[in-house]
Amino acid sequence: VSTQSTGRFCQGQLAQYYKDFAPNSELAKLENTEKRYTWLMNMLEHYNKYWAKIFPPSWRMNECICEEFCFKTREKLIEILEHTKSTLNVAVLKRAIKKTLIFERELCNMFSNMNRGYEEPLSVDEVDIDVGVNPRSAEAIKLKYLR
């Protein structure tokens, strides 16, 4: 099967997402980051109910859908952050980051048998948002243990 065909199918499955979270829509705000992730999980339930039996498991269509979703969501969140630099609410940003880490962990667990060797994302408690320190650096580890 061609990558182009599977890509088109994945984009088709995400068409409603593109509409619901279009720029300038109420849902296209940083405060609604968690709703993006909920949307995908609901869509995957729909996929598993209606489409999963049609495609061979080796095609990994659910993984393709998630990958496309993640790429597009990353692009959109970057755009949102660039447009709200001067008015960004740190509490909203911190919540969005925490929800994103939780979502990443859910996806890693969902696809763990397919992604051997993938480094598990940091836990929510390991993220040091306030100082912008790399959470894996010696400084961040020191700060963690000083708390």
Image (cartoon, helix red, strand yellow):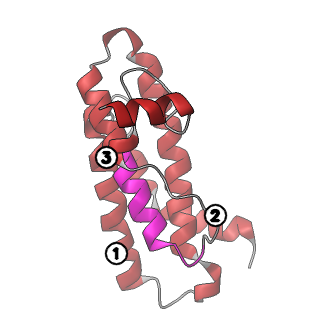
Write down the region rendered in magenta. 99-114
Residue 79 is left or right of residue 146, and the answer is right
Nearer to us in this view, 77 or 120: 120
Q: Residue 99 at what x, y percent from top left?
A: 31, 46
- The residues tagged by marks 1 and 3 sit, at their Cα atoms, a distance apart of 22 Å
Q: Is residue 52 above or below residue 81?
A: below
Q: How many marks?
A: 3
Q: Quadrant of the C terminus?
A: top left
Q: Tell me, for residue 99, which label it has, or none.
A: 3
Identify residue for label 2: 7
Q: Residue at x 56, y 79 (%)?
A: 113
Identify residue for label 1: 46
Residue 138, picture quadrant: top right
Q: Check disc 1 and report its element: helix, strand or loop.
A: helix
Residue 1, picture quadrant: bottom right
- Type of amino acid at the residue the image marks with label 3: Lys
- Pick whichever of labels 3 and 2 is earlier in the sequence: 2
